[in-house]
Amino acid sequence: MSKLVDLFPSTVGENSFGPGVDVNVVRPSMLFSEARVVDGTLYLMYYPLQSSDQQLASLSQGVLHPVRLARDYYAMEFRNDNRLVLAKDSGGVQDWYELRNGVAVAAQEPASPVYGLPHHVLMDGD
C-alpha cells in the first residue's frame, strides 16, 4: 500500500517528515479512480490526463502493469466481490471481465450480483 501512496502523494512540506528524510513530489499524468485487491493483486482504475477512456492496471513493486481489454472504455466499475469488472464504451456496449492473476478474461454477466462490503477498498480521498 505504501507504493500506491508514493504514486499519489498529498501536499508535502519540507518539514512533513522530520530531519534526514528527502521528499520527492511526484505529479503523475493520471487521475486515480479506484483500487481493489483481488487474490493478492492490487488493481487500479485511472484516467490518463490525455484521454477520456478509463484504464485498468495492476501494481507490482511500484510499477503499473496495464491490463489489456478488448477495446477502449470510457468507464469501468468493480463488481461481484471485486472479481468482475463492468466496462462501458461510448456506444453503449457493456462488457464483463473477470480478474485473474493480473489478466482480465472476458466473462458473462453474472446471474445475480454479490453484495456486501468489498475488501480493501481505496477511493479518492481515502
Image (cartoon, rainbow, N blue to C red):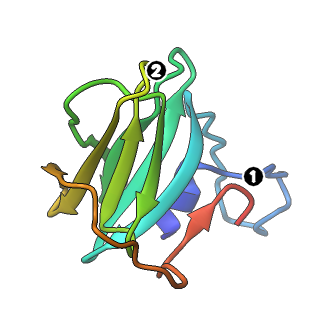
Residue located 84% across and 51% down the image: 13
Q: Is residue 78 above or below residue 75?
A: below
Q: Position of residue 72 (x, y in %)?
A: 33, 24
Residue located 47% across and 82% down the image: 119
Task: Residue lying at the far top in this picture: please name it.
Answer: 50
**What is the quadrant of residue 20 in the picture?**
bottom right
Q: Nearer the viewer, residue 63 or 45?
A: 45
Callout 1, which amino acid?
A: Ser
- Asked whether disc 2 touches disc 1, contact meaning CB atoms under 8 Å apart, the reply is no
Task: Residue lying at the far front in this picture: please name it.
Answer: 111
68 relative position to 76: left or right = left
Q: Which residue is mark 2?
A: 90
Q: Is residue 63 visible?
A: no
Callout 2, which amino acid?
A: Ser
Q: Any mark on residue 10, and which?
A: 1
93 relative position to 90: left or right = left
Quick one: label 2 or label 1, which is nearer the N terminus? 1
